[in-house]
Amino acid sequence: MNLNILVLPGDGIGTEVTGEAVRVLRVVAEKWKHQLTLREGLLGGIAIHKTGTPFPSDTEKLALEADAVLMGAVGLPEFDEWPPEKRPERGLLGIRKTIGVYANLRPVRSYKALLESSPLKNHLVDGVDMIIVRELNSGIYYGTPRGIYEDGPEPRAVNTMAYTWSEIERVTRMGFELARKRRKKLTSVDKSNVLETSQLWRRVVVEIAKEYPDVALDHLLVDNCAMQLVLSPKRFDVLVTENMFGDILSDEGAILAGSIGMLPSASIGAKKPNGVWTGLYEPVHGSAPDIAGQNKANPFGAIGSVAALLEYSFGLNEEAAAVNRAMEQVLASGRVTADLKPAGTPATTEQVGEAVCQAI
Ligand code: IPM
Ligand code: MN
């Protein structure tokens, strides 16, 4: 197969973990005889430094041409005081919208080797296996009007949470389809006791559920869901929710996996004419400027994102499974980075990447 991939390392530890992810991708391509075409682009803070904008038009063009995009992380402290529309993060929102990846899949699972890394009791975490499906192209991240208005008696800020029926429907379907292939349980998360967007959300989910009688559906309010995630995380199979709720709940979910450095993500859009699914793959963690450039970031989130890329965009299930198995092997061997609190000397980012390549 021809794997035509755009790599956007981004900022901070993004470049380090993406380096290892690409190394793994090359090993897979070589072993299974796929032709790998890699291109690299600028996104986020580095793009602002080099071009003046977080999502340059060159990157936009490359992203639209590629089959799939592999991304690191965006965000740099020197832009902390900048307004939202100029910040590195806006680059990420731009690319998500431009390539239309509306469903962000964030698998959260526990690993036997990491039970001690989670602050939660082992019996709560052991056996956790869920996917958070986060709506990624709409909601309060994109709604208008938005802005800070200084023209009244005092400064006033506005953000808008808006959803259309079809925006809810497509991500809901993704949730049901995934649940169907797993333990057939879908939990829809909203705030329908307060928000109109959530009331529409619930209406759509209930309507679409009629087409999936084999999937057990329940609804949770987001505040209760935040509690249930740490109280009884094993009750969840697939969870579907709007953009900002999904952002918040998935960071909480990271606690179940032992470290946010473990979490991969896959953002999926439409199927292309060549049969490949549009996808953007990135670890859930951020650019972590405090540890950037020190070769100690955990590359598993990025490497897991490569597995997701192989599976979801290209349907290469065997290759994806091999990457996941290799990661488990390395985890079990204890050669892991400092965030996972290994017994001996922590491994470097590069050593973990190398170990995964060897295991494949
Ligand atoms: C994430 C991140 C991003 C988001 C930021 C960096 C814009 O937190 O992918 O979870 O909020 O979507
Ligand atoms: Mn987030």
Image: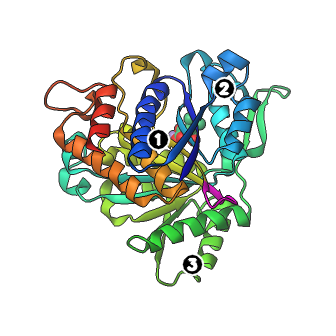
Q: Which residue is mark 3?
A: 209
Callout 1: CB less than 8 Å from ligand 1 = yes
Three-letter amino acid code at the position of disc 1: Val
Tell me the quarter of the picture where residue 238 sits.
bottom left
x, y (%) of residue 76? 55, 21
Residue 130 against residue 148 in the figure, above or below = below
Residue 274 against residue 172 in the figure, above or below = above
Q: Secondary structure at mark 3?
A: helix
Q: Which residue is mark 2?
A: 87
Q: Which residue is mark 1?
A: 284
Three-letter amino acid code at the position of disc 2: Arg
Residues tagged 1 and 2 counted as in contact (Cβ below 8 A): no
Q: Determine if the magenta segment contains residue 180.
A: no
Q: Magenta residues? A: 269-277
* Dot 1 or dot 3, earlier in sequence: 3
User: Nearest the camera: 336 or 188?
Assistant: 336
Residue 90 against residue 214 in the figure, above or below = above
x, y (%) of residue 173? 59, 69
Find the distance from the CA under tag 3 to the CA under tag 2.
Answer: 39 Å
Q: Is residue 76 left or right of residue 87?
A: left
Query: Which residue sits at x=67%, y=33%?
Result: 90
Three-letter amino acid code at the position of disc 3: Ala
- Label 2 Cα crowd, 10 Å radius (few <14 / some 14-19 / many 20+): many
User: Nearest the camera: 328 or 44?
Assistant: 328
Q: Is residue 180 left or right of residue 207?
A: left
Check residue 293 in the rendering and tell me which mark sits there, or answer none: none
